[in-house]
Image (cartoon, coloured by chain):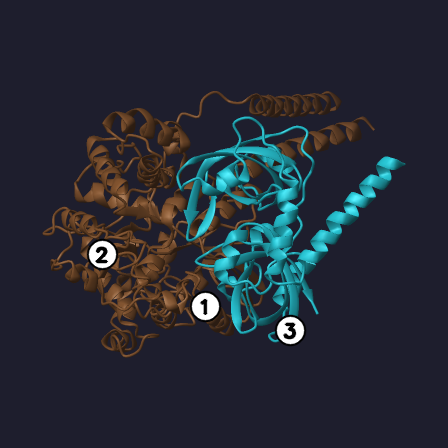
Chain colours: A brown, B cyan
């Protein structure tokens, strides 16, 4: 009876201990992913894929076909897709679902966002080992499709997915920004387009385009609306200008450098042209393409991935037919400070794999990700917008080369502006750049945008935007809004940080564990002593 | 008893006037305007009347009092609000708001909003970042739908952001954003050969409702009566709140 009691005590203590340890495990997250020896095709596996498109129905159809084709190859895998048209919304939903352990399996995202996802433990799978796995890696022997090898991934694009010591994503598509120019209006004003656009040229022509005739209509377009220069993504605008000036933005480690004199000069220039009405932004006025197509904008900077919405004969449009104007559209690099050393941002969707308890589920996710890199998917998706495929295998394929060669054959599949936009990036891959990725880099990117938006809004709201206003009002507002003074850069994977003193619940838990071990030890000691006494 | 009778008579009169406004095309506007003018209410000190708001320039600071009519879903300390007073309507895009206050922004709630007037792709609104406070003693006003059937886009501009009704419309096209159920639904309706764009906003209505299914399942050629807030995106683009298939 006594022995039974002791057993009971021990069992109870062990249960308490195991529950305590389970609690600890739960708080640390899922175990690190290990590649299974074999992919188990006898089990049903269900994957969730959060995808992003550009409000382009063809892209949706391509995703659906890719899923169908993949499921035909792997009948035991079902892929459920949820579509978004905004990276920010995907990011918000992932953050929400990280807390509940309900992230998708595969997700289209930006590296900046992944850096935040990495604050959880083992949340996103590092892909390096998977890349090189002989069976299931890139070009692996057991794949049921003809995917790219590691050497067939465009190195610059793949490099963009490497941070915190590993590749946490693969590129899916790449784009850059282009300046879509109404050449007809530029020449009508007596200017000739240079080979490379400069900021000086754009500002000068934009100011000239503000000339109004008697009666208030603008001379260049004979309309009552003219915003000569509109920039869609002001985060990219600030980031690109700083990079072109070789000025500070952030260090690779995450030190914030954006609040510098070059930034101030940029903001003063922006403020000057907002004041005359020569410059505006998407957030303030609307989509550049809508104004551009209506002949109300001369320089529209937008993603090459938005090229099907831009131009006199754009196949996609949000404005009615009667508002379109006839003119020649030219696709150029974004304006530069130094035309001999052009710099443009590299952007576009990447794909990451979220870790799950079941390694087979993760392996299935990785197989699906690789399937998105096959030529059929890459070529089809790249042709929906001014994207470029991320593998040399797809870029060099006869199908893709044939597509490029048919520029302007029609205003749908071979829309000239779209193919020109793709070519822009293909010809300038080495001029493209990305910003450092760290936990907080997404906030810094938002802050870069907010600086320009604040300066522009302040001018419009009759504030005097001078150096003092920038330093005393805009900088502190933006710092506070994005908590740039509280960034926890070290929290992402690979980072080191001082976590501070243990919280009280943790102290109690550790104390409880020590007590359990002490009781177990005492019980063991008492039992041994009794057994010794009997013998 | 007398009070009760007076209230009943007043109510009947309002309903009669609103009824007059429905289904009579452009003549409806004059009836509706009569009602609105008759109901104009005084504003607190320092608060603009709707007429003053209407003539304020884009980028001017505005201070208004209004009654919440509906809200889109709250996120990240922001909420988008459809609001009205007895003279007109307002749209507050991404107004600053904490989660607790968001729950109190129920239809009819009176609030005072301070922000900047702006125009985005034709939509006249109070810009992102406006602040607000609750106003005690409001009358929980809910604006009736104004019948705008038969009006041109130019005429509709005067009713921007108001709850409006289009009756006897023909369904021309229905499509899901991204071609997938679960997000916004775009609906094109016509009247006498003129097309009008409508949108079921996911953030206003959600997607798990019978209403969402009704709109998603509309058949081309069907005749419908619809109501919605008259949002503007490069033209009238009402956010649907009610659809009745005839």
Task: Report crowding for label 1: few under 14, some 14 to 19, many 20 or more residues within 10 A (C-alpha).
Answer: some
Image side of residue A303 versus residue A194, left or right: right
Q: Quadrant of residue A447?
A: top left
SS for callout 3 = loop
- Residue A63: percent from left, percent from top: 46, 67
Q: Are marks 3 and 1 on the same chain?
A: no
A287 up-or-down from B45: above or below: below
Residue that numbered label 2 is attached to: A219
Mark 3 lies on residue: B222
Q: Tell which of B66 and B72 is nearer to you.
A: B66
Relative to A59, B189 lies left or right? right
Label 3 vs label 1, nearer the camera: 3
Report the residue marked by disc 1: A57
* Parent chain of label 2: A
Q: Position of residue A88 (x, y in %)?
A: 44, 48
Residue visible at 49% across and 61% down in the picture = B153
Residue A141 in sight from this viewpoint: no
Badge number at residue A334: none
Is the residue at mark 1 from the same chain as the one at mark 2?
A: yes
Q: Name the spot of residue B69 as percent of width and height, x first.
A: 63, 44
Q: Quadrant of residue A304?
A: bottom left
| Residue at 66% over, 21% down | A522
Does A322 sit left or right of B49 as displayed?
Answer: left
Q: Circle 2 sits in a helix, a strand or a loop, which is it?
A: loop
Q: Nearer the viewer, residue A372 or A175?
A: A175
* Crowd rating for badge 2 (residues with CA inside 10 Å; few <14, some 14–19, many 20+): some
| Chain letter of disc 1 in the image | A
């Amino acid at each position: 009876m006594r022995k039974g009691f002791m057993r009971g005590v021990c069992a109870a203590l062990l249960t308490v201990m195991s529950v305590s340890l389970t609690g600890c495990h739960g708080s640390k997250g899922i175990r690190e992913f290990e590649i299974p020896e074999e992919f188990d095709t006898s089990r049903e596996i269900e994957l969730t894929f959060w995808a992003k498109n550009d409000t382009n129905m063809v892209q949706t159809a391509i995703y659906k076909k890719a899923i169908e084709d993949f499921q035909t190859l792997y009948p035991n895998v079902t892929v459920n897709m949820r579509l978004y048209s905004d990276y920010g919304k995907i990011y918000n939903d992932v953050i929400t679902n990280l807390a509940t352990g309900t992230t998708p399996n595969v997700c289209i995202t930006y590296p900046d966002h992944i850096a935040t996802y990495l604050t959880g433990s083992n949340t996103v799978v590092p892909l390096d080992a998977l890349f090189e796995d002989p069976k299931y890696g890139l070009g692996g022997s057991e794949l049921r499709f003809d995917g790219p090898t590691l050497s067939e991934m465009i190195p610059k694009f793949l490099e963009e997915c490497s941070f915190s010591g590993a590749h946490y994503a693969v590129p899916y598509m790449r784009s850059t920004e282009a300046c879509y120019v109404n050449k007809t209006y530029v020449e009508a004003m007596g200017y000739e387009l240079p080979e490379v656009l400069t900021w000086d040229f754009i500002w000068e022509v934009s100011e000239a385009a503000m000339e109004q005739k008697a009666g208030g209509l603008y001379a260049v377009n004979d309309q009552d609306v003219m915003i000569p220069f509109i920039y869609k993504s002001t985060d990219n605008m600030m980031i690109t200008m700083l990079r072109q000036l070789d000025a500070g933005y952030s260090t690779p480690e995450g030190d914030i450098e954006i609040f510098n004199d070059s930034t101030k000069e940029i903001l003063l220039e922006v403020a000057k042209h907002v004041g005359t009405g020569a410059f505006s932004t998407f957030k303030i006025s609307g989509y550049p393409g809508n104004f551009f197509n209506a002949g109300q904008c001369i320089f529209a900077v937008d993603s090459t991935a938005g090229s099907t919405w831009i131009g006199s004969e754009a196949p996609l449009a949000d404005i009615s037919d009667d508002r379109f104007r006839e003119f020649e559209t030219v696709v150029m690099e974004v304006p530069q400070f130094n035309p001999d050393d052009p710099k443009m941002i590299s952007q576009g969707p990447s794909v990451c794999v979220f870790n799950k308890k079941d390694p087979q589920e993760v392996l299935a996710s990785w197989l699906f990700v690789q399937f998105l890199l096959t030529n059929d998917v890459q070529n089809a998706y790249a042709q929906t917008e001014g994207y470029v495929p991320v593998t040399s295998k797809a870029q060099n394929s006869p199908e893709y080369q044939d597509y490029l060669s048919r520029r302007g054959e029609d205003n749908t599949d071979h829309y000239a502006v779209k193919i020109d936009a793709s070519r822009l990036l293909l010809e300038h891959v080495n001029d493209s750049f990305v910003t450092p990725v760290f936990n907080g880099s997404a906030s810094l990117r938002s802050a870069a945008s907010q600086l320009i938006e604040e300066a522009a809004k302040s001018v419009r709201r009759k504030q005097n935007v001078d150096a003092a206003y920038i330093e005393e009002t805009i900088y502190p507002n933006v710092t506070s809004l994005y908590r740039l003074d509280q960034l926890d850069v070290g929290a992402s994977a690979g980072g080191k940080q001082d976590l501070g003193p243990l919280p009280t619940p943790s102290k109690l838990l550790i104390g409880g564990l020590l007590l359990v071990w002490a009781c177990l030890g005492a019980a063991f000691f008492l039992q041994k002593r009794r057994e010794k006494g009997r013998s | 008893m007398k009070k009760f009778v007076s209230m009943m008579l007043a109510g009947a009169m309002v309903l009669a006037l609103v009824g007059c406004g429905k289904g009579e095309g452009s003549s409806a506007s004059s009836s509706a305007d009569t009602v609105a003018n008759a109901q104009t209410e005084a504003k607190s000190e320092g608060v603009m009347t709707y007429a003053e708001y209407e003539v304020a320039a884009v980028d001017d600071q505005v201070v208004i009092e209004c009654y919440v009519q509906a809200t889109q879903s709250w996120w990240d300390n922001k909420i988008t609000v459809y609001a009205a007073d007895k003279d007109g309507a307002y749209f507050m895009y991404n107004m600053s708001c904490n989660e607790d206050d968001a729950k109190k922004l129920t239809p009819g709630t009176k609030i005072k909003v301070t922000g900047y007037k702006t125009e985005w792709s034709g939509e006249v609104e109070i810009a992102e970042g406006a602040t607000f406070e609750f106003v005690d003693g409001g009358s929980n006003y809910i604006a009736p739908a104004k019948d705008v059937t038969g009006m041109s886009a130019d005429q509709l501009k005067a009713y921007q952001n108001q709850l409006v009704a289009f009756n006897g419309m023909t369904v021309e096209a229905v499509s899901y954003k991204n071609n997938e159920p679960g997000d916004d639904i775009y609906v094109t309706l016509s009247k006498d050969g003129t097309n009008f764009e409508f949108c079921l906003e996911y953030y206003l209505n959600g997607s798990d409702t019978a209403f969402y299914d009704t709109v998603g399942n509309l058949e081309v050629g069907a005749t419908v009566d619809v109501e919605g807030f008259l949002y503007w995106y490069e033209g009238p683009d009402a956010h649907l709140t009610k659809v009745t298939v005839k």
